[in-house]
Image (cartoon, grey):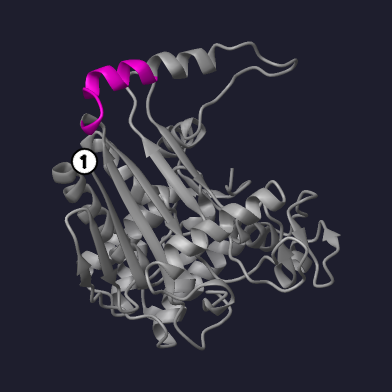
Amino acid sequence: MAGVESGRPFQASVLRNFSTEILERAGVPSDEAAIVADSMIESNMRGLDTHGVTRLLPIYVARIQAGVMEPRARITIERDRPACILLDAHNSLGQVAARRAMELAIGRAQKMGTSLVGARNMNHYGASSCWTMMALAHDQIGFSTCNTPPFVPPTGGKKAIFGTNPFSFAIPGGDEGPIVVDMATTTVARGRIALYEKQGLPIPEGWGLDRDGIPTKSAEEAMKGFLQFMAGYKGYGISLVIDTLSGLLTGALFGMHVGGPIAEDLSRPSGFGAMFGAVSIDAFMDVSEFKTRMDTALREIRNSERAPGVKRIYVPGEQSAEKAVLRRKDGIPLPEAVITELVQLGDKLGVPFPSDPASAT
């Protein structure tokens, strides 16, 4: 799980308010700032700290101030068919465009049974599962893909062409809860290596390569080098499909042409592409019947015979849900290096970072 290993805990509401005010000071309208802040805090709550305030807030502000990301959203519909829509985000904040796209996908799926909404000229939109999980409340299956800056060579190559190219599915369940899959096509997201670098920790073997393509356990060297695909050439194949859906099909940038890295290349817009989908369960069967079948399937998985030393079998999304329960009680941990960075950001924009012990849990 892409989470912070340790840190000083803060209440979610405190970090949400700080993040919202920071974005507003950077020129983001209050309603749009709230969407971005909510996305980051939700990611932190679920332990996806690479996509939370922990990492993204200073990056977004830097991109806005550099003039390579628009603080105010402008989102237009370029093509409109009964079950398919193409949006142009016009370099808007990724979370604002993603929320709009998923709302449209959900609405069309309620009418048509299924839908796809593509978006071009996007920016980084946070954790994919923030958007796919929107479909759960409507008894729909949510789906999203996104392409990202190139950090990975194709199998057999030595030039970075593909990004981490994440994808997510959120599938409703009954008493046993939903299935939520959110993953990069690389072994880990680049943001996770960045967090290890910030904390001065070595990375596990198999996460990254140095600039010469040699496996390394140094987070610093991996950040200068390459990521590795999950499952070797199979991850390469999945990444190519995601780049095709998100970038080529939407008219967005693709492959090596995508701008980035977002934290380091402040010279041009990202030009990401993304795809969002929704499937209404009742287009195929009664919702109650589906959820009963889901409960049966998940109980069979959880109660299946375990390997030696394994205490529990999880289903995708379960650990993140449990992390949210703990962090609601104990707070969101921020490493001291991150706190220092947020303090400096707050000082720059005139928004004091909360230091009163009463604001920490």
Q: Is residue 284 magenta?
A: yes
The residue where tag 1 is placed is 113
- Tell me the quarter of the picture where residue 22 sits: bottom left
| SS category of the residue bearing label 1 | loop
- Tell me the quarter of the picture where residue 36 sits: bottom left
In the image, residue 278 sits, relative to residue 311, either above or below, namely below
For image coordinates 41% across by 74% down, the residue present is 252
Q: Quadrant of the C terminus?
A: top left
For image coordinates 21% across by 53% down, the residue present is 83
Residue 71, position as x, y percentages in the image: 31, 78
Dot 1 alpha-carbon crowd within 10 angstroms: few under 14, some 14 to 19, many 20 or more: some
For image coordinates 40% across by 63% down, the residue present is 274
Residue 241, position as x, y percentages in the image: 52, 57
Q: Is residue 11 something one can see in this rendering?
A: no
Depth check: give the residue in front, 270 or 17. Answer: 270
The reply, left or right, for residue 58 in relation to residue 131 is: right
Depth check: give the residue in front, 199 or 173. Answer: 173
The reply, left or right, for residue 209 in relation to residue 255 is: right
Q: Is residue 202 magenta?
A: no
The reply, left or right, for residue 101 in relation to residue 275 is: left
In the image, residue 208 sits, relative to residue 262, either above or below, namely above
Depth check: give the residue in front, 103 or 320. Answer: 103
**Extreme residue toward the left, this view:** 111
